[in-house]
Amino acid sequence: MEKIREKYDKHVVASSYLVLAPQIIGLIVFSIYPVFWVIRYSVYHYDGITASFAGLENFIRIFTRDSGYWMSILNTFIIAYGKLIIEIPLSLMAAMLLSKKVLKCKKLFSVGFYMPNVLGIAVSAMIFTFLFSSFNGIINNFLIFAGIIKEPHNWFSDKWSAMTVICTHSIWVGFSTNMLFFMAGFQNIPDDLYEAAEIDGASKIKQFFKITIPMIAPTLRIILMLAMVNGMKMTNNVLLLTNGGPAGKTNVVMLYIYKAFFETGAKAQYGYASAMGVVTSVIVAIVTLAYLRISKKSANVY
């Protein structure tokens, strides 16, 4: 009997490893190996064919001669953190409307809010390209009809107007995901708290700041962390909307690194791009750790 049990246990263990094997192999091949590959070639001059040891030369170039990289870092921070001022309150408001018995046809509104994620980044970027088109674009036509502008504005010819389009698109695509997180957080708030507050005469605004915000504070901290990290990694929407234009003024850091990896018309810079990837990873790690430390301290307030 014991031999049968031992044989069965070994069979279960072997089956478990077989089930986990594809995920483990995928993690090693697509996550762990690329990290070590980038770290290794960050100290090389590597063009995909020949590699020569460069020491710290790539990093010295980043910190002393490449102003474009630091401009892309600044653009990334402006877009990633600037959009949160609108995206987070908008997500919270939409989640509250859908969680409370305020709106009719809540399922229809939920589908409508989440539609940008279903469409995909390429389709949504194409929609925004047509919306903000300088020739017969819906936004320009509306602004002219309202008397705000007299002639069509080329939204992609100026840095700040182009970044406004990028931020607007990012908010439109991203707020629905945050809305779902907030709705999940609202499920954990007992209705008894609101009923007790109403009996005590607390207004809706006071209930929001004294009950809703403290109760969803853990969810809010996670949402902010994910939004900041994902904002630092944005690439596709900028690539599809402006491709870093005009004249590279809307480059974000991941797009800047991407162009260094796959630069056309010049020698590939895999080694230098790897060094930029290492520096960017350190910056993202520092920002994330700083946020976690600050949020941990602020958690004591609630």
Image: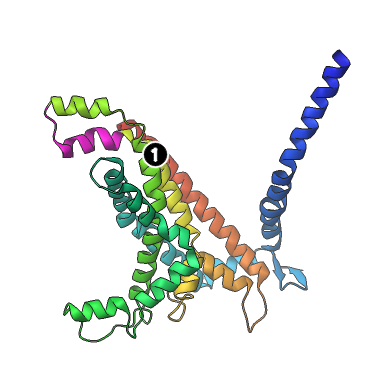
Residue 237 appears in the picture as rendered: yes
Q: Quadrant of the N terminus?
A: top right
Q: Residue furthest front?
A: 105
Residue at position x 43%, y 53% in the image: 228
Q: Secondary structure at mark 1?
A: helix
Using the image, determine if residue 170 lies above or below residue 98: below
- Work out whether residue 192 or residue 222 is closer to the camera in this orientation and state it: 192
Q: Residue furthest top?
A: 1
Q: Is residue 206 magenta?
A: yes
How many discs appear?
A: 1
Residue at position x 37%, y 82% in the image: 157
- Work out whether residue 279 or residue 169 is closer to the camera in this orientation and state it: 169
Using the image, determine if residue 129 lies above or below residue 170: below
Q: How crowded is the residue under tag 1: few (<14 C-alpha within 10 Å), some, or many (20+)?
A: some
Q: Position of residue 184 (x, y in %)?
A: 39, 39
Is residue 287 toward the left or the right of residue 162 in the image? Answer: right
Residue occupied by mark 1: 184
Q: Is residue 106 magenta?
A: no
Majority SS type along the magenta span: helix
Q: Position of residue 229 (x, y in %)?
A: 47, 52
Q: Quadrant of the C terminus?
A: top left
Q: Bounds of the magenta span?
A: 201-214
Residue 71 appears in the picture as rendered: no
Residue at position x 30%, y 34% in the image: 214
**How does the figure colour the protein chain or chains?**
rainbow
Quarter assignment of residue 198: top left
